[in-house]
Image (cartoon, rainbow, N blue to C red):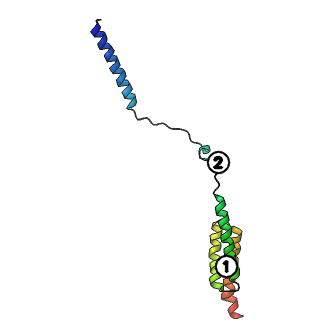
Amino acid sequence: MDKNDHENHIEEKRADEADTVSSYNDRDEETAAEITADDFRTADVDDDDDIHVGGAAVGWIALALSVISFFWLPIILGAAGIIVGFVARGRDANTLGNIAIAAGAISVVLALFIRPFV
């Protein structure tokens, strides 16, 4: 083997290696990682406090509307107490919402069916 053959052989080997490296770079490979439930847990996030405070306030407003409806504008305030009572139940103030709904319904029933005949 003379010097030119040796150089040609080295150049061919380098060209083959370059083709191999470029063929590795041309591949579109997909990689994945495992995901567990621990990856989605957040440490100190508690957004529920605002909902409960607002729900209690709405519940008390609904109860006030229902109680006032026994004495003044029973159909309008009773209906408003019922509607706001359902809103309070939707905001996790179940007890206040249920009491407001019941009181508003009783007020409307009394105004429509009992008071006209008394």
Tell me if residue 76 comes above or below residue 21 in the rendering: below
**Of residues 8 and 94, which is closer to you in this image?**
8
Task: Please give left or right for residue 2 compared with residue 22 in the image.
Answer: left
Going 63% across and 52% down the picture, which residue do you hit?
45
Q: Quadrant of the C terminus?
A: bottom right
The residue beneath circle 2 is 43
Going 35% across and 23% down the picture, which residue do you hit?
18
Tell me if residue 47 comes above or below residue 106 in the rendering: above
Q: Residue 106: where, in percent of width, then height?
A: 70, 81
Q: Secondary structure at mark 2?
A: loop
Specify the label residue 18 is tagged with: none
For the residues labelled 1 and 2, the Cα–Cα distance comes to: 40 Å
Look at label 2 and name its amino acid: Ala
Q: Residues within 10 Å of mark 1 (few under 14, many from 20)?
A: many
The quadrant in which residue 73 appears is: bottom right
Task: Please give left or right for residue 110 compared with residue 28 in the image.
Answer: right
Q: Quadrant of the N terminus?
A: top left
Specify the label residue 65 is tagged with: 1
Task: Please give left or right for residue 16 compared with residue 112 in the image.
Answer: left
Task: Please give left or right for residue 88 compared with residue 27 in the image.
Answer: right
Going 28% across and 10% down the picture, which residue do you hit?
5
Going 64% across and 76% down the picture, which residue do you hit?
82
Q: Residue 31: where, in percent of width, then height?
A: 48, 36
Look at label 1 and name its amino acid: Leu
Q: Secondary structure at mark 1?
A: helix
Q: Earlier in the sequence, mark 1 or mark 2?
A: 2
Tell me if residue 61 comes above or below residue 92 in the rendering: below
Q: Residue furthest top?
A: 1
The quadrant in which residue 86 appears is: bottom right
Q: Residues within 10 Å of mark 2 (few under 14, many from 20)?
A: few
Q: Residue 83: where, in percent of width, then height?
A: 62, 75
Tell me if label 1 and label 2 are in contact, CB under 8 Å.
no
